[in-house]
Amino acid sequence: MYEAKWYKKLSNGKVECLLCPHHCVILLGKISICKARKNTNGTLYAINYGECVSLAMDPIEKKPLYHFHPGALILSVAPNSCNFDCPFCQNAEISQSKTYTQYISPEELVDLAIKKKSLGIAYTYTEPLTWYEYLIDAGKLAHKQGIKNILVTNGMIDEKPLLELLPYMDAANIDLKSMDEGFYKKVVHGDLKTVLNTIKISRQHIWIELTNLIIPGYNDSKELISKLIDFVAKLGVNTPLHFSRYFPHYKFTVPPTPVETLKFAWELAKEKLNYVYVGNVWLEGASDTYCPECSNLLVDRSYFYANPSGIEDKKCKKCGRKVDFIL
Ligand code: SF4
């Protein structure tokens, strides 16, 4: 049993979790809404510690991380928990319902990554922030062994726990689902301000890329897409932005995002940002990286295969501009 970090004891055996802005008050014997924590006799335990619902070797491009060790393979793991409730969740079978898991200790996880010659460990597929204590333990151990840690996350975490976690992480893909506070509150049961804060703080400490899943009728207006692009531009024009195509899944029956919408968002974002990509659909050139200085093809991508043939000594082969990649 692993006692949770970031909580406080209340009266009558109740506890309040302080990990994410939900600040769940959990009664004696009850489990939190994210299914990751349980109040046993007035102590909060991380009941999902080390319990893996999924484990695979993935190309890092699948996260997606396009500018962090392109072409590398990474051991990818997930907990059976999430602190959002997205009705369109593409991984609902393992994020929203309780299912079979297997305990893998931090030592076993790191050993496996080394054995598989993995770049490191990606905590992904569901919501790894609900695995907080495990992330810190496995993350520390991975760093000791010289391998990387990567988060693929919704960014829903309070600032203090985030700052404690970031030294053990190296890169993250953070979902920015919409710039509409109402969408976060009503549709996914999250908090936009927190996510924006996580993005801003993370960018100061680790490599980040952002993903925006465009859903017809929910976050696909020109106004919202422009607002999102402006936010990313303010962070830094070299921050990679991935637009992703939505497909109906879980509780959502809205038809898939029209390719024209994705193309529109891509073209609009390219006016202000250096690295914009479109995923979950084939669009000529939308997954390749070009040099912002001379337009030379730096990385040619085909599905999850990346060929960084335009880069030499961390510079563009053609014009010598230093590339915005972690290699
Ligand atoms: S991490 Fe889980 S238990 Fe803690 S506040 Fe968030 S949803 Fe509640």
Image (cartoon, rainbow, N blue to C red):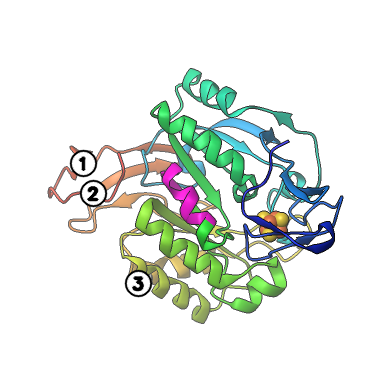
Q: Residue at x 46, y 70 (%)?
A: 264
Please give the residue where the numbered disc 3 appears in the rendered image: 234
Residue at the (46%, 77%) spot, across then down: 227
**Amino acid at pointer 3:** Lys
Q: What secondary structure is the stretch in magenta mostly built from? A: helix
Q: Quadrant of residue 244?
A: bottom right
Mark 3–mark 2 Cα distance, whole angstroms, equals 20 Å
Amino acid at circle 1:
Lys
Callout 2 touching callout 1 (CB < 8 Å): yes
Q: Residue furthest left?
A: 319
* Residue that label 1 marks: 314
What secondary structure is found at the residue carrying circle 1? loop
- Foreground residue among 50 and 247: 50
Task: Tell me, yes or no, if residue 66 can be seen here.
Answer: yes
Q: Secondary structure at mark 3?
A: helix
Q: CA distance from mark 2 to mark 1?
A: 6 Å
**Amino acid at the residue labelled 2:** Val
Q: Quadrant of the rendered structure where residue 170 is? A: top left
Element type where label 2 sits in the image: loop
Q: Position of residue 231 (x, y in %)?
A: 41, 72
Instruction: Judge from the rendering whether residue 106 lies leftward or rightward of residue 291; answer left or right.
Output: right
Rendered-image quadrant of the N terminus: top right
Quadrant where the C terminus is found in the figure: top left
**Crowding near pointer 3: few (<14 within 10 Å), some, many (20+)?**
few
Question: Quadrant of residue 13 in the image?
Answer: bottom right
Task: Single out the residue that lies furthest toward the top.
Answer: 115
Res 323 label: 2
Task: Indicate which disc, 3 or 2, sits on the residue closer to the N terminus.
Answer: 3
> From the viewer's perspective, is 294 left or right of 11?
left
Residue range highlighted in magenta: 161-172
Q: Is residue 289 left or right of residue 242?
A: left
Q: Which mark is residue 249?
A: none
